[in-house]
Amino acid sequence: MKQETAAQNSPPASPPSSQPLSEDGDPQALWIFGYGSLVWRPDFAYSDSRVGFVRGYSRRFWQGDTFHRGSDKMPGRVVTLLEDREGCTWGVAYQVQGEQVSEALKYLNVREAVLGGYDTKEVTFYPQDTPDQPLKALAYVATPQNPGYLGPAPEEAIATQILACRGFSGHNLEYLLRLADFMQLCGPQAQDEHLAAIVDAVGTMLPCFCPTEQALALV
Ligand SMILES: N[C@@H](CCC(=O)N[C@@H](CS)C(=O)NCC(=O)O)C(=O)O
């Protein structure tokens, strides 16, 4: 079992050599793209945030999680980005400036890299309100090479795993439903068929999994 305190002594994962600059070229400013739990719980200080999307990637519940939403015995499932020429993934970009940059990277290194198996990748982010003014951003992506990677599975199997798991940050079902809530807020133009199929499968199974009042107590 990983210990967050022990992990905090690990050196921060090195961000790309050419850190994504903010639109005004300030080297001390950085945009960080969140598309999973970072969408509702960034937990680092930032100066600005934008809802929008990245092209060329699809979001998939293909990363195992033995800390935040699962355990060593029952790994939960959280999201990563899959390279997909036709893909589009909605999320939130957060701008960090000055001292916020090193603080955010240090924090995310523990939460995403050390505890979650994610690596950093530069992406192009399109703000919903100004898609003609894209931004370079840093994203945390779990690649198939990381030990926690679970890879593809039928959405029904993913839903079953999510219903059965919880970790130090809460139930895996909460993770799924908070992400689904965010996508609802983004509006009808934001579609995620993979996410919607898992939510539908959970809705079908939940009554069999436990009575409604117990289901509500899960999250
Ligand atoms: N890197 C993605 C996924 C992040 C994610 O969900 N990471 C997990 C680590 S395994 C996490 O931080 N979970 C915290 C939580 O579930 O509240 C993002 O940008 O949002």
Image (cartoon, rainbow, N blue to C red):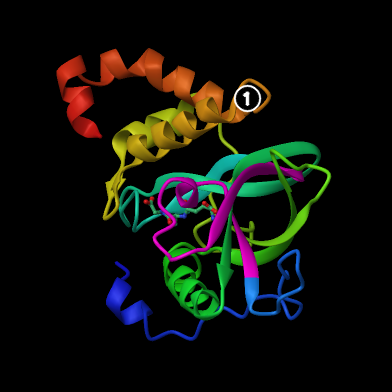
Looking at the image, residue 73 sits to the left or right of residue 218; the answer is right
Q: Magenta includes 210?
A: no
**In the image, is residue 106 above or below residue 1?**
below
Q: Residue at x 45, y 44 (%)?
A: 77
Q: In which quadrant is the C terminus drawn?
A: top left
> Relative to residue 38, is residue 211 depicted above or below?
above
Q: Which residues are magenta?
A: 30-58
Q: Nearer the viewer, residue 139 or 59?
A: 139
Which residue corresponds to the image point at 39% horizontal and 40% vertical from the top-left? 175
Instruction: Give how far across and how far down residue 203 sits, in percent.
Output: 39, 17
Question: Where residue 34 sits: x, y (%)?
Answer: 56, 52
The residue lying furthest to the front in this view is 24
Q: Which residue is mark 1?
A: 193
Q: Is residue 218 left or right of residue 43?
A: left
Is 52 part of what is drawn in magenta? yes
Kind of residue indicated by mark 1? Glu
Residue at position x 56%, y 47% in the image: 35
Q: Residue at x 36, y 17 (%)?
A: 205
Residue 14 shows in the view: yes
Q: Between 26 and 193, which is closer to the camera in this rendering? A: 26
Mark 1 CB near ligand 1 (8 Å cut): no
Q: Quadrant of the N terminus?
A: bottom left
Element at label 1: helix
